[in-house]
Image: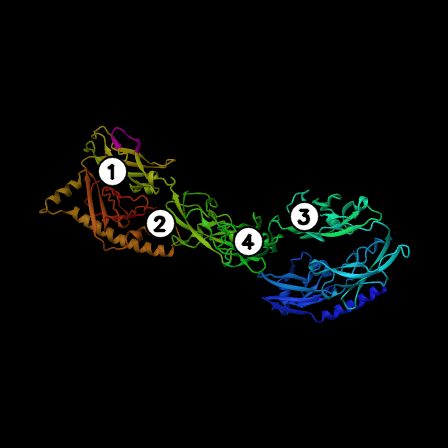
Amino acid sequence: MTKRMGYRDWRWQALWWHHFFLLWSTIDGQTRYTIPEELKQGSVVGNLVKDLGLGLSEIFDRNVRVASEAGKQYFGVDAGKGELVVNDRIDREALCGQSTSCVLPLQVVIQNPLHLHRIEVEIKDINDNSPNFLTKELSLKIAELAAVGTRFPLESAEDPDVGSNSLKSYTLTKNDCFALKMKDVEDGKTVPELVLEKPLDREKKAVHQLLLTALDGGNPVMSGTSQITITVLDINDNFPVFEKNIYKVSLGENSAKGAFVIQTTATDADEGPNGEVEFSFGSRTPDSVLSVFEINSLTGEIYLKGEVDYETATSYKIEITAKDKGIPEMEGHCRVQIDVIDVNDNAPEIVLTSEPQPVREDAPIGSVVALLSARDLDSGDNGKVTLQLPKGSPFSLKPSFSNNYALVTSGVLDRESFSDYNIEITATDSGSPPLSSKKTIPVSISDVNDNPPRFSQPSYNVYLKENGVPGSILYSVSASDLDFGENAKISYSILDSKVQDVSVSSYVYINSDNGSIYSMHSFDYEKLKVFQIRVQAKDQGSPSLSSNATVHVFILDQNDNAPAVIYPSSAALGSLSHQRMPRSAKAGHLVTKVTAVDADSGHNAWISYRLAEATDASLFTVNLYTGEVRTKRPVSEQDDSSQRLLIEIKDDGEPVQSATVTVSILLEDGLHEPILDLRQKAVEPSKKTGRITLYLILSLASVSVLSLLTFLILAIKCIRNSRSSGSCCMRRMDCDGYKNPNRNLQIQLNTDGPIKYVEVLGGDMLSQSQSFRSCLSPMSEYSDFTFVKPSSTTDFKEMINVLDASLPDSTWTFESQQVSRE
């Protein structure tokens, strides 16, 4: 024990000496280090920073780690120094057994980006194991009649070391009868044999004690011993002899239990019990053989008892003993070598060297996703593995070395089409029949902001009733984004635009989270009929993407305006209008014409007239649509000279809006019809037209002068009070309606009975916005001149200017009358 400990101290000194002379070399682009076994934990193997061309900071930043194909992690990386160090005890004999070469392949995995380096560490043997006999004490029984030269096989010693440190020789203590000889066997090995050099004489010496010593070639030499006790027996002087010293047979690893393997045969020259032979496995047969094979003791037939596995043991070498039944027993020996034939019974295996990382959907082709390797425990063609990906996959396998592969992108990725891939890799060997296995590698695709928000439709039509409640919701637009996370979060906004020279944001606002559009005040159809809102949806990606949609808002008219009477004009000043007519009027005589307008549109602006009350309802009638007041019958002497009519004016809206006007008619005797005289004077140009023509010319001139002055005054006021309402509506109308005073005047004179009206149009008859009408009432105390600009929605084609009563002989005077504009 003391000697053993001293040797170990020397051995560790030698190990540390080797530690300072570690070698490394690059073979075929790979780095190889050579170290002795049994280095202490933390011993430096090599400098990865220098040998792999890395920076010291990269060791930590890129998470450099070592993956061992041996399963156990014998090495690690010192992140502080960038050195490959020993992580665990390395026993070469445990790793490589009797193999002359012991190389541990390592994979250095470098992240960000993924990269793989292959490193080989060669483990050199040191003489740390002495030869060892499984049987420390061996007993032999030899008949005294044994012939000189008879050989007796001895147990071979085992030395786990290899090369010069392995078993080299045997020695035997000096004696008179026996010598030690070496016998060559297969694989270049030798086994010791005890050779009888002199006849034995039991009577002189019945027991011989010998010491067998096994020596290795290490420095210093290590040894092991086995005590041999030889008992000299009398009689039975022939031992069984096998037909062959070595039996060889091949056995498939898929052989069934109970299968016949081989038969050994031995004969004994003796007779009777001394010649009866029994077969058995050698006394030193390990349990790994006894659990797999069995032998028939009478016939020497060997059968399969368990299962053989080529990947566990490729060959079995079994010692067979044949003993006779003589006294003393004699035995013979032979060896059976059973070679296991590999069968393709192991499916290939796919091993992930590096877990897959999420891949950006805009990653270029060739980007590394994961590192993997393939292996098959079978040998030959049965162990050759090919990997295959399903067709149509945007990924491919890029081989590197020694069945190592990189999973890389080979096509365009689109997270919106496929956000995750379960890549099924099939590994198939070249055996017959081939075996295969599959491994699914999940790969997630990370989002890139490559999709702008999309509205459900490019434009929206919203129909909104006027006079709504401020703050009420108008409409909700919605947009969706195919991206994910922040790239799919949408905010809504209204793009700045003008509505009647005012920012649209003064009319509406939008909820940036859900796209709901709200009104900021109620809308008036008579002022605003339609406007547009441009809504933008923008995501929160970097850079952000956006799209626009247009919301068309149509204001729906409500019947919120009652009809307004524009003639008789006195209805605007009071509730009574005075008219005169002759008693000589016949049935159908036009008394007057009531004219009203409604600021609404459509059905809401359709006006009807009805005689609500009358002094004598049988005398007058009102046209439902034109508002003309005519006599139903001739005027009689019995009719009152003063007639009062209450006329109701209604629109066609819901609910109905109405207005009334009271007309007072005075029946007079001897009232003539000046319009007829005007006609007669027009027909007879040779006669002087007299005062009617002069009155008409003076009226038109007065109208033009007064209108021009009025328009100038109103234009100045509109500039000062552009934001005011009420009377300014009429002023704006006037400014629009009389922009060019140098327009042609067209006069339409209508005569029907004693009541006349004339319509004066300025400029193009097709342009409603630049026309005006004069309503002349020569029979009244005042002549009314009324300007009307038609509504752009109602598009009035005709405005009626009624001349009430007959033209007087006196000079006309005009009074400007304002009419509210829509």
Could you say which disc has been placed on residue 592 in the image?
A: 1
Q: Nearer the viewer, residue 159 or 594?
A: 159
Give the crowd class for mark 2: few <14, some 14-19, many >=20 residues within 10 Å: some
Confirm or deny contact between disc 1 and disc 4 (CB under 8 A).
no
Give the amino acid at mark 3.
Val
Per the rendered image, the range of residues in magenta is: 610-621
Instruction: Describe the element under mark 3 as helix, strand or loop.
Output: loop
- Residue 615 located within the stretch drawn in magenta: yes
Query: How far apart are the alpha carbons under marks 2 and 1?
Result: 29 Å
Give the amino acid at mark 1.
Thr
Q: Choose mark 1 or mark 3, whichever is in front.
A: 3
> Residue sitting at 22 percent across and 40 percent down?
805
Q: Is residue 561 above or below residue 424?
A: above
Query: How far apart are the alpha carbons under marks 4 and 3?
Result: 27 Å
Residue 66, given in percent of the width and then of the height, sits at 65, 61
Could you say which disc has been placed on residue 386 in the image?
A: 4
Q: Choose mark 4 or mark 2, whichever is in front.
A: 4
